[in-house]
Image (cartoon, rainbow, N blue to C red):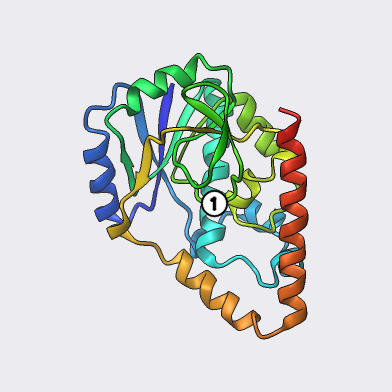
Amino acid sequence: MKIIVISRRSDTRRRDNIRTVLKACPYEWDFLDAYEAGTLPGWFEAIYDESKARRYRSYPLVGGEKGCFASHMRAWVKCVYFDEPVIVLEDDSVLSADFWEKVSIMESSGFDYVKLERRSGGDALDGIFMVNHKNRSATTGYYLTPVGAFKFLSALNKIYMPVDHYIGMAWRHTVAPIGLIEPVVTNEASLGTSIQQDRQREEKINSKNRWLRFLRKLRRYVDDFKYRRFIKKL
């Protein structure tokens, strides 16, 4: 198994953070240089659908969301290429004391994806794993097999939502949204990010239109219904 750390080459503070976090890492790990708004590859622009993004959530993806999605897609491609499971971490990750112990359990779990942070409740499968009640928030850390990575990639024909929302669309790519009852990853809040501020600014601009607000809520309700229907079958 390998560890893939998504990190902007220019952000030395974040890179210093994750180097310290992974100082005792028993696995091979390396940085994946994250894409930024001004360095997006041509293949991403070819599958990003801004008009659909506006219809889906009333405004387009902000620059950081585009770079984040492209970077995680590249990590999925690497997972398929390596043909072995990976842990994908963002560079503001903080690991719990039992992180490596839990990782070894994941390798033999048979799951294709495990969210390592906790953003919602879930239905326990045993004393360690659960099915997340929701799974569309944050991508600080997750375990992924080549099968899971291939499913993420093969179901993606157009990009019109943030990557965490896409991962949460379990009914679309059929990767079971497994989480941990006791999370092993949090994020270092002091490192910050501009994505939330940029998104909130776009939301504020578009919130004046009641019709757009209604459509955004309706689509979220529909997505929640599809998600609940999917996890009931697990």
Residue 225 in the image: state x and y as whole percent.
76, 49
Instruction: Write the residue at 44% across / 21% down.
Output: 1
The residue at which mark 1 appears reads as 137
Q: Is 175 on the left or on the right of 200, as rendered?
A: right
Instruction: Write the residue at 41% across / 33% down.
Output: 182
Residue 14 versus residue 116 in the image, above or below: below
Instruction: Write the residue at 64% across / 25% down.
Output: 147
Give the residue at the far bottom of this rendering: 208
Instruction: Write the residue at 42% across / 67% down.
Output: 194
Q: Is 179 on the left or on the right of 183, as rendered?
A: right
Residue 49 versus residue 142 in the image, above or below: below
Residue 163 in the image: state x and y as whole percent.
59, 50
Residue 76 versus residue 98 in the image, above or below: below
The answer to whether one can see residue 155 in this image is no
Q: Is 101 on the left or on the right of 220, as rendered?
A: left
Q: Quadrant of the C terminus?
A: top right
Residue 209 in the image: state x and y as whole percent.
71, 84
Q: Could you say which quadrant of the image residue 176 lies in?
A: top right
Dot 1 amino acid type = Ser
The answer to whether one can see residue 115 in this image is yes
Q: How would you rate the neighbour count of disc 1 (Cα within 10 Å): few for under 14, some for 14-19, many for 20 or more?
A: some
